[in-house]
Image: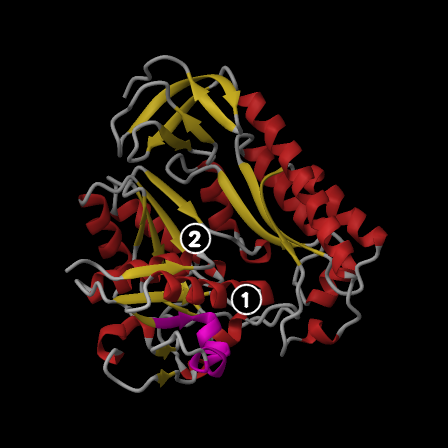
Amino acid sequence: MSEPEIITLGCRLNIAESEAMRQQLGEQDDLIVVNSCAVTGEAVRHTRQAIRRAHRRRPEARIVVTGCAAQIEPETFAAMPEVSLVLGNGEKADIARHLLGDRLCVGDVMTVRQQAPQLLSAFAERVRAFVPVQNGCDHRCTFCIIPYGRGASRSVPAGAVVDQVKRLVDEGVQEIVLTGVDVTSYGPDLPGSPTLGLLAERLLRHVPALPRLRLSSLDGVEIDERLFDLLVSEPRMMPHVHLSLQAGDDLILKRMKRRHSRADAVKLVARLQARRPEIAIGADIIAGFPTEDDAAFAHSLALVHECRIVHGHIFPYSPREGTPAARMPQVDGTIVRERAALLREACAMQRTGWLRALVGSEQHVLVETSGLTGHAENFAPVRFPAPQPAGHIVTARIAGLEDNALIAHGQPHV
């Protein structure tokens, strides 16, 4: 017997939850779990493709579909002959108990008011762990279906987060990534209404052996002064800020029902980099949102340069049934794809220039399990000419750039 096969699509929260399901299920080699994503129509299509491929490859295996697509479109997946069981997001935390139950088990996730305290963690190369501290979302961006897949915003108590991080550090994890659906909304549902900044402070204070703390995608309007000060002044908080920007045009941002303006985004990045120049900026940007004309797109394209976005996540807009944006005048699909390509090209140019500027510098690199690759504090990828101690942070002199990765010089020292 061996572990079940788990196919994960989508976000880091899904990655963490997949690892938790793997640990819960134990040895069940006749099982394939597809942890789905619904962020775009394309993501749902990829989920269906993954199911069919898995069935062709292993026709004897039972296929369980869970995640956001299963939560939002349960009947779609229940109707697929390849699928044995459909589980909602509220049920996936107790997947083992549901394996012998009804074929369709999807509850009303909007009624869930507490985040399960058993913190779920996923490992990247067994040296970095994603720790979900929040789930759900109370905002209603016009393009987004995810609140209907994840439910209301709810947070994990800080004490439980600290305990979990302590366990992970004791097991050798060098870097913790706090993640969630809307992680900057952490805390209002908990006693005393703590914030994400307060949680990060508490983690750093109570887990002094934790070398590196990183945050997943942040909503800039919810970065308060406590969190801002940590990002720019705390050495153990990694200089890598990924922002949910979505667009660079004020009218489009308003139609998206975002809570920030273009000027807000530019000002925030300028403040961050003025206080901590080495901070690397990442961002989510949607190309071709409904009603986006050439001028509006030009504003988003210019934002890549103004905010020096080096970790760009570009999403071609695709309508999601049930969202307000799906009812707005749509941009032609060919234009959407062209604009996405231009945004990716702009981010790639920023990234190449940024990486070149790091040549000759000294970087602290967390070595991954191969011993030949790792990531610097700013999340720049680094390659080594000879194996390094996996799971350790080494100091490396950067000698060059090759295939979008920094090349370390000689034998770095621990």
The amino acid type of the residue labelled 1 equals Arg
**Whether residue 133 can be seen here:** no
Label disc, if present, on residue 197 of the rendered structure: 2
Q: Earlier in the sequence, mark 2 or mark 1?
A: 1
Residue under the image location 73 percent in, 64 percent down: 254
Q: Nearer the viewer, residue 188 or 343?
A: 343
Where residue 414 appears, x then y in whole percent? 27, 21
The amino acid type of the residue labelled 2 equals Gly
**307 with respect to 99 (left or right):** right
- Point out the stretch of residues depicted in magenta: 64-79
Where residue 336 appears, x then y in whole percent? 73, 56
**321 with respect to 128 (left or right):** right
Query: Looking at the picture, does residue 245 appear above or below residue 331?
Result: above
Q: Nearer the viewer, residue 64 or 392?
A: 64
Query: Looking at the picture, does residue 198 appear above or below residue 144?
Result: above
Where residue 195 appears, x then y in whole percent? 43, 59
Q: Is residue 66 magenta?
A: yes
Q: From this viewpoint, which residue is outermost toward the top?
A: 410
- Label 1, on which residue? 45
**324 with respect to 66 (left or right):** right
